[in-house]
Image (cartoon, rainbow, N blue to C red):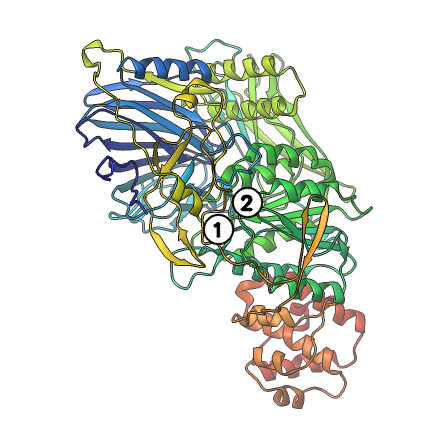
Amino acid sequence: MVNCCGLVSEKNQPVPLKSISVQLQVKDHVVSVSSSLHYVNEEKRPLEAVFVFPLPADAAVCHFSAKIGEQEIVAELQDKESARDQYDDAVSSGQQAFLLEESDESSDVFKLSVGCLSPGENAVISIVYVMELSVQADYALRFCLPAVLNPRYTPAASAAGVPEVFSACVIPYTLSLSVEVRSSDRISRLESSCPLDPLVFLDAQHTHATVNLSAGHRFDKDVELLLYYENTHQPTAVVEAGAAAAQPGSLMGDPVLMISLYPEFPVDVMSSLVSRGEFIFVVDRSSSMDCMMHHGKDPQMRIQSARDTLLLLLKSLPMGCYFNIYGFGSRFESFFPQSVVYSEDTMEEALNRVKNMKADMGGTEILQPLNHIYSQPCYPDHPRQLFIFTDGEVGNTKEVLDLVKSHVNSHRCFSFGMGEGASTALITGMAREGSGHAQFITGTDRMQPKVMQSLRFAVQPAVDSISVDWSVPEGVTVDMLSPPINTLFQGQRALIYAQLKGQSSGTAEGAVTLKYKLKDQPVTNQLQFALKPIEDTGRMIHQLAARSVIRSLELEMRAGRAEAEAVRSRIVELSVQTGVSSVHTAFIGVNKDGKRTITGPLLQRRVPVRSMAQMSVGGGGGSGDTRMRRMPQMFVAGLGNRSRSGGGGMRMHAMPVPMMACSAMPMDAPMERPMDHCVLREESAAPKMFHSGGRSIWTPLIAEPEPQTDPLLQLVSLQKASGCWELNASLAAVFGKTESEVTKHRPAQVDGSMWATVLALIWLYACRSGDQVEWQFVAMKAASWIRSQKPEGLSQCVRDGNILLGGQVTEGMLGI
């Protein structure tokens, strides 16, 4: 195999990316990210290169420039087709040109074309984007600088695709990162998955601070930052002044308001979780799921983490609900032809199949199982809750999101991105369009706590009759720039953008009121805000508001709810006016200095395609535009680490940003059937039903149970569907006892199951209290079962259990 490290020369030498510098400016709940990428052409001939890199799906790209030597070229936004034509014309005439465009298929993939980089010349590419910071379960605000762009599997029938990524050897460039935080709330702390220098506070109130990434960081994984404010859960309002040069009445010319709301749900209502529902778990079983969750100590494989999580979920479901489990790859299968009632028998059958789930299903085609699920009728009075687990590597993201959106009234979608490089566009998009919640499991994160938090959201009483009302003085009007709020969860933030039009000669304040009903109980949250900002603090809020409007228009266009060309024109006009990129615009910069025009043949890189395609992701064809005809298919050569091989293939880690590619094979060249980017394994012998051409095909059963090593998972695996445990040697082993020891201490008034269940609860509260978010539903079922038995001598049972296990747990703590 050719040793490909980035953009390779004729002698297989890389055109190096020397360094990456990133500056973050955080303002309350949003951040501006400025990235500078330093490249050098060490060739003796001019180059044209294409760099493919990930950005967060909800980011608003608002600046792009290139500095060649001492000359800076600031790009401008144009209609994408016009920008591509201008780029082609410039490169053809030997001028330096730069083109930055969003992928047509996924909003978290960008392509940067650099034309005519002279021999020995330095190029510093600067990109600025702004984005919202997501809220975590512990109220931390999360920022992630993606280091990898995993291969995006494109279905064979699709004509379009995201450029592929191939990993190789080492990471030759450095990363420097600095963070500045300004907040209306006190900053508590800032944590990271990577080493940081000490946090430095710049004011006595602790509302302004800076921190840097420690020197020597190797950019081989995502850089995750967690920012904690002292009162993150409190609602806030930020007003940003309009631009003086912009026309009054336009989005950029008027003040824009960002409201951050945290609904407070009544405790008595939230304590009564629903017991009904249809829970469908959709698990990625493509080859990439056989990769490690992280590169730290003792990592699990992604598929093993998914199996452990499914065990916990299956044990946590309420009796009488409906459930099913799907696995998908190049095909899909379901445990049951349709969702079944949750009982001891169906739970055990599902658990036996979960034990044998493997990453053995090829590529990643999520559209097929989703179509099949949505074609199944819903059960009356059992709201459908969809849980999707994937490492997020698909090439038809927007098609998937449109499908989820079209069924938003019949279900809620909770999505989980596993491992480095999961597509933020896919994961956050499915949750947003499905009125659910998204979680990312990166680094050494455990999946189970995040999944169980989402399960708690799923079983919360539904919020309905949501409304947002504005109170402003005469002469001022409010234009909502955000889509309607469809869902609210306890502890989750809702961001609202609005444009303030007109002037008021009187009152300087307004108010926004959020109203909703929870189990027919009306709830009201109100927040005051200033109509005019105290000072000019930039355009970050304006740009995020523009991004919100543009995304809504793009969805409207794809849904066909309006005349496509008219909506496209509105998107282009708003994008150019606000300086925020869209799928229909691109940043174009051309060095028109005639004295620097480059002559001579353009050196194009050709990366061998055939052998790589057989190991990794296959691509779709190119689009019909002129640029793609000139460069039909981009194949990316990465800068990663090659892992061990196995199963006849090679496992390849995805590569860090940014990636480099060149033109490769012709459009009509034959392509092997695409497979996912990790090692290909033999088919699992677990029982399965997969769907092909409307037929259901079963394969034989060969059980391959894997022993549980975590005592918590061992305990959970032994619980019955009803919530109780049986007294046996396996349960005693979890407690570090023998079965005879446990039996000898059983009070005479209770039977074995009651004694075992009380002991299990005591052990959870006494020995695994820090993991309560994982076993909360398991414990609730157990406590409910105990109460239903109305046992005598329960107090004595708890006292004896504490003595046996060395606990100090009360009946009140156990909920019995």
Q: Position of residue 52 (x, y in %)?
A: 38, 33
Q: Is residue 237 left or right of residue 150?
A: right
- Quadrant in the rendering for residue 435: top right
Of 811 and 345, nearer the camera is: 345
Label 2: how many residues lie within 10 Å, few (<14), some (14-19) or many (20+)? many
Which labelled disc corresponds to residue 636?
Answer: none
Circles 2 and 1 in contact, beta carbons < 8 Å: yes
Q: Amino acid at mark 1?
A: Ser
Q: Position of residue 667 (x, y in %)?
A: 45, 28
Q: Position of residue 43 (x, y in %)?
A: 19, 31
Q: Position of residue 482 (x, y in %)?
A: 59, 26
Residue at the location (36% across, 55% down)?
643
Distance between mark 2 and mark 1 Cα atoms = 9 Å
Of 656 and 770, nearer the camera is: 656
Q: Quadrant of the C terminus?
A: bottom right
Question: Going by the picture, which residue comes out furthest to the right?
Answer: 380
Q: How many marks?
A: 2
Q: Is residue 641 left or right of residue 721?
A: left
Residue at the location (46% across, 31% down)?
59
- Quadrant in the rendering for residue 803: bottom right
- Quadrant in the rendering for residue 325: bottom right
Residue at the location (23% across, 11% down)?
593
Which labelled disc corresponds to residue 288?
Answer: 1
Q: Is residue 346 left or right of residue 510?
A: right
Label 1: how many residues lie within 10 Å, few (<14), some (14-19) or many (20+)? many
Of 513 and 678, nearer the camera is: 678
Residue 227 visible, this angle:
no
Q: Amino acid at mark 2?
A: Thr
Q: Which residue is mark 2?
A: 364
